[in-house]
Amino acid sequence: MTEEEVLAAAYSMPLASPSFPMGPYRFFNREYLIISYRTDPEALRRVLPEPLTFDEPVVKYEFIRMPDSTGFGDYTESGQVIPARLPPELGGGQAGYVHAMFLDDDPPIAGGRELWGFPKKLAQPSLRVERDTLVGTLDFGGVRIATGTMGYKHRTVPDEKILDALRMPGLLLKIIPHVDGSARICELVRFALTDLVCKGGWSGPAALELAPHALAPVAELPVLEILGATHLVADLTLGLGEVVLDYLA
């Protein structure tokens, strides 16, 4: 291959067989269980990168089923999102900082990390209905580290409220090392979900249990109080990102 051919083909590793295709990345019937909880503010400060701040010590724990997505296939993921605030010099406003993500499919792990900087690791999450209960679980290396439950479709949530929540931008800390192990890329990245179609939203009683694990430390943001839970189904497109802050500049 010539240098020009290499550069034209070089959008993903490995060059000869990229781990994921080019976008856009459209998701159909994407299903969420989101449990909001109050946590220890000191623990939150330890994991939220500057210059981000928070108004309240709140975490959103998510279990997400993606049965049909272009390029990434059928998979499930689980993780934590922190409602954060950008400083005025970076435009201000609120966004959801993605603190941890665990999923069971290689293409979205590779694509999520390489393109956007999603903090994805391989694990075994699930989201299913058991009789009258929506159940989300996360196993890491055979160890159960998260269990979330919610009463199934107890109360309807208006579509516009669901869409407002999905429209909130997300934030990521994208880290790519140099060949000597130092940071070559260290950026705060913002992304958004677009072309949203709400197919239903519900609320109900919920519970969440997190267990300590050395390599999947979701329990380091402990559950002090359950604030609410939402079950929703939507079609959406995962938009590409923009760099908000280059830590190495």
Image (tube, helix red, strand yellow):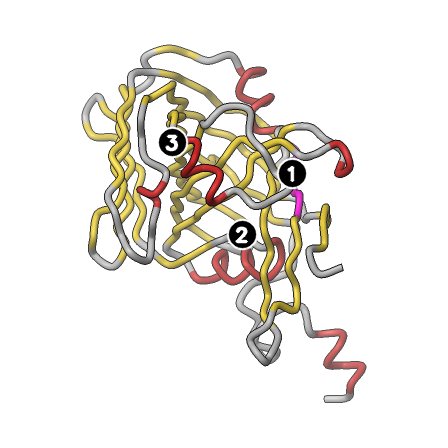
Q: Is residue 161 left or right of residue 247?
A: left
Position of residue 106 relative to residue 80, above or below, is: below
**Amino acid at pointer 3:** Asp
Q: Earlier in the sequence, mark 3 or mark 2?
A: 3
Q: CA distance from mark 1 to mark 2?
A: 13 Å
Q: Tell me which amino acid carries mark 1.
A: Ala
Residue at which label 3 appears: 40
Mark 1 neighbour density, 10 Å: few (under 14) some (14–19) many (20 or more): some
- Find the magenta span and give its range: 189-195
Q: Answer whether labels 1 and 3 touch (C-beta < 8 Å).
A: no
Q: Position of residue 212 (x, y in %)?
A: 25, 47
| Nearer to us in this view, 11 or 113 | 113
Reading the image, the residue beneath label 1 is 192
Q: Dot 2 surroundings within 10 Å: few (below 14), some, or many (20 or more)?
A: many
Residues at marks 3 and 2, CA–CA distance in whole angstroms: 24 Å
Say whether disc 1 or disc 2 marks the residue closer to the N-terminus: 2
Which SS type dominates the magenta stretch? strand
**Which quarter of the rendering shows the N terminus?**
bottom right
Of callouts 1 and 3, which one flags the residue occurring earlier in the amino acid sequence?
Answer: 3
The amino acid at mark 2 is Phe
Q: CA distance from mark 1 to mark 3?
A: 28 Å
> Magenta span has 42?
no
Asked if marks 3 and 2 touch (Cβ < 8 Å), the reply is no
Q: Which residue is mark 2?
A: 118
Q: Determine if the magenta segment contains residue 192.
A: yes
